[in-house]
Image (spheres, helix red, strand yellow):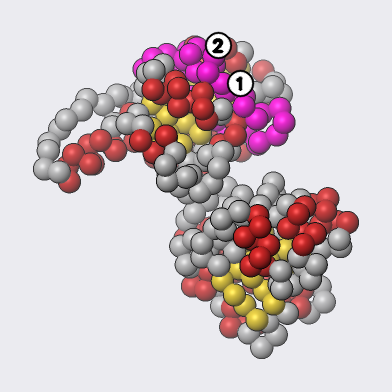
């Protein structure tokens, strides 16, 4: 059985799991770089029986699934991966399995972005390495207002940390109930009120047709000029062109981003050259603890499949 391990950007897949356990039953190949496009992916994956992938990286769409006729198994990190066309997998009788994931790393990273913007960490760090000393004046968080868009698991974790900083928290989403927000010590408000009142707006929603382009130029213009936008959820929730325009026009003080409409973010993308943008390369779930958990369970899933069984089956 030929197995392709995709999306190993940090070249650590073979460190976090003992793939030697299946070497006598499988031929493994690790791909460390993203494919140029879908045709490039198909060209490289035609002969494989199984794919082991990281969520939200290489798209496993209809064209690829139809082209890769030998494919029988897909193992993804996490139990939900919007990049996989599950309907086509079902039609082609391709088994899809997942793994557990730690729920806390993305919320923790959200605060790295918030603090990074509030205290000008990017500029101060760059200036320190160039020999300068104290070139900016930061902003305190205590007494400020955090606006959380999406009060699910991630939004709730971010909210709890905000309270430790002494921030007021307001929240909005289409389905947010006032009683649910009150139970978490949060004030439910309208979307427009949240954007106008918050000193920091942090997005914690699942990408869907309803949430795609949820934040556009007019929404950004509702925010305070000294407010920050944080997105660690999905890039397409914020209209990227509108965000670039708002940053260029200084409609908001800055944006902290870990997700983008196109990933990896092109080297010449305008966001890379914005002085008021703090950018990370989608590191939300990228921790040693998460990788260890995910890769070990990926290997366990593969072993079970080779034994004629399936665990953590998505479909």
Residue found at x 17% / y 46%: 129
Using a 10 Å C-alpha cutoff, classify the residue at mark 1 as few (fewer than 14 neighbours), some (14 to 19) or many (20 or more): many
Which residue in the structure is indicated by mark 1? 172
Residue found at x 22% / y 25%: 137
Residue 161, percent across and down? 46, 34
Q: CA distance from mark 1 to mark 2?
A: 9 Å
| Numbered label attached to residue 193 | 2
Using a 10 Å C-alpha cutoff, classify the residue at mark 2 as few (fewer than 14 neighbours), some (14 to 19) or many (20 or more): some
Q: Nearer the viewer, residue 291 or 216?
A: 216
Q: Are marks 1 and 2 in contact (CB under 8 Å)?
A: yes
Residue found at x 23% / y 41%: 125
- Residue 209 colored in magenta in the image: yes
**Magenta part mainly helix, strand or loop?**
loop
Height in image: 308 above or below 213? below
**Residue 108 in view:** no
- Image quadrant assignment for residue 256: top left
Q: Report the magenta residues as a range.
A: 197-226
Residue 209, percent across and down? 72, 31
- Looking at the rendered structure, the secondary structure element under dot 2 is helix
- Residue 35 colored in magenta in the image: no
Residue 168, percent across and down? 46, 20
Mark 1 or 2, nearer chain start = 1
Residue found at x 39% / y 18%: 249
- Looking at the rendered structure, the secondary structure element under dot 1 is strand
Q: Is residue 60 left or right of residue 14?
A: right
Height in image: 144 above or below 47? above
**Residue 246 in view:** yes
- Image quadrant assignment for residue 26: bottom right
| Numbered label attached to residue 158 | none
Height in image: 166 above or below 39? above
């Amino acid at each position: 059985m030929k197995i392709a391990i995709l999306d190993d950007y940090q070249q650590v897949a073979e460190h976090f799991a003992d793939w030697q356990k299946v070497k006598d039953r499988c031929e493994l190949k690790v791909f460390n770089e993203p494919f140029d496009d879908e045709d490039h992916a198909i060209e490289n994956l035609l002969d494989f029986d199984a794919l082991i992938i990281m969520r939200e990286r290489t798209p496993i769409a209809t064209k690829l699934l139809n082209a890769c006729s030998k494919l029988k198994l897909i193992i993804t990190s996490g139990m939900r991966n919007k990049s996989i066309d599950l309907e086509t997998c079902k039609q082609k009788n391709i088994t899809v399995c997942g793994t557990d994931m730690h729920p806390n790393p993305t919320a923790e990273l959200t605060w790295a972005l918030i603090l990074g913007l509030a205290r000008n960490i990017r500029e101060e760090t760059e200036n320190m390495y160039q020999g300068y000393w104290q070139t900016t004046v930061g902003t305190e968080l205590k007494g400020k207002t955090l606006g959380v868009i999406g009060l699910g698991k991630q939004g709730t974790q971010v909210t709890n940390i905000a309270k430790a900083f002494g921030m007021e928290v307001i929240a909005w989403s289409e389905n947010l109930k006032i009683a649910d927000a009150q139970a978490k010590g949060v004030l439910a408000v309208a979307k427009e009120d949240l954007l106008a009142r918050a000193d920091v707006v942090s997005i914690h929603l699942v990408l869907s047709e309803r949430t795609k382009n949820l934040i556009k130029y007019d929404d950004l213009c509702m925010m305070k000029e000294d407010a920050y936008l944080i997105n660690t959820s999905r890039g397409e929730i914020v209209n990227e062109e509108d965000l670039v325009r708002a940053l260029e026009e200084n409609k908001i003080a800055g944006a902290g981003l870990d997700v983008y409409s196109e990933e990896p973010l092109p080297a010449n993308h305008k966001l890379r050259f914005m002085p008021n943008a703090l950018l990370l390369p989608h590191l939300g779930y990228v921790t040693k603890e998460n990788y260890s958990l995910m890769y070990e369970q990926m290997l366990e899933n593969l072993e079970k499949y080779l034994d004629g069984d399936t665990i953590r089956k998505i479909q």
